[in-house]
Amino acid sequence: DSGVTQTPKHLITATGQRVTLRCSPRSGDLSVYWYQQSLDQGLQFLIQYYNGEERAKGNILERFSAQQFPDLHSELNLSSLELGDSALYFCASSVVPRPGPELFFGEGSRLTVL
Amino acid sequence: AQKVTQAQTEISVVEKEDVTLDCVYETRDTTYYLFWYKQPPSGELVFLIRRNSFDEQNEISGRYSWNFQKSTSSFNFTITASQVVDSAVYFCALSEAQVQGAQKLVFGQGTRLTINP
């Protein structure tokens, strides 16, 4: 158990809909990261937050947004969903955003868009 | 640009055999970090090791060992006396030293390792 909690574990929805994925980092970790794992793109970095502020952005679509709240939990919002958004979405956390910390990943939220 | 290549898509061996998973990386930075993660069938990503670019010492942890060679830009992972429980997808990843604490892990495509009894 990494200590990172993600909900929901599974989610099935239809195209055009909007979903919110939730992540609670490990106790004491201030930095949160979101990754997407799909069959065609592999594991891709989406976005990083540190203590409520965005620190780095990757290949995150404009239809996606994220935030980190004062209690340090984070949410990833996916809107106008398309079939290609079906993927496993991981949240990870680390103590500080210095380069090179090991990231501890949650179990992921599997999104299926029908 | 950063890139990680895991040329072996799938490997299948019989239990107790030794197996090496290859990882080749590309980066322009002199300071960077390399990682290996394991993704068992249950789906979670499990951290195995982190190595910074200034530390080329090989590391051994039980049946696992890692060989880091800057000259060939490789960070290979060997499992000795493999066990069925080692069956998983293994990912190699690279992170460059970013400004303002930004951290982006670039993952390879993964190697699916199957250990047959």
Image: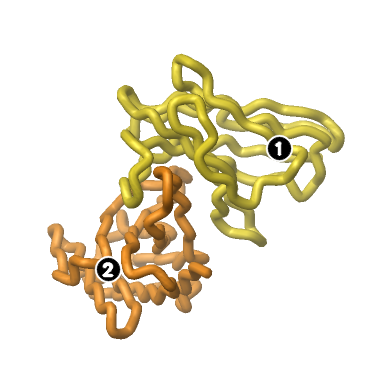
Chain colours: A yellow, B orange
Relative depth, front residue between A7 and A72: A72
Q: For residue B16, which quarter of the picture?
A: bottom left
Q: Residue at x 33, y 77 (%)?
A: B74
Q: Which residue corresponds to mark 2?
A: B15
Residue farthest to the right, as pictured: A16
Relative depth, front residue between A113 and B5: B5
Left or right, A52 with respect to A66, comes to: left
Q: Residue at x 72, y 45 (%)?
A: A61
Task: Tell me the CA gap for discs 2 and 1.
Answer: 44 Å
Question: Whole-percent x and y of residue A113?
Answer: 77, 40
**Mark 2 neighbour density, 10 Å: few (under 14) some (14–19) many (20 or more):** some
Question: Whole-percent x and y of residue A41?
Answer: 63, 60
Is residue A107 at least partly visible in the picture?
no
- Badge 2 marks a residue whose secondary structure is loop
Q: Nearer the viewer, mark 2 or mark 1?
A: 1
Q: Amino acid at mark 2?
A: Glu
- Badge 1 marks a residue whose secondary structure is strand
As drawn, B69 above or below A28: below
Q: Amino acid at mark 1?
A: Phe
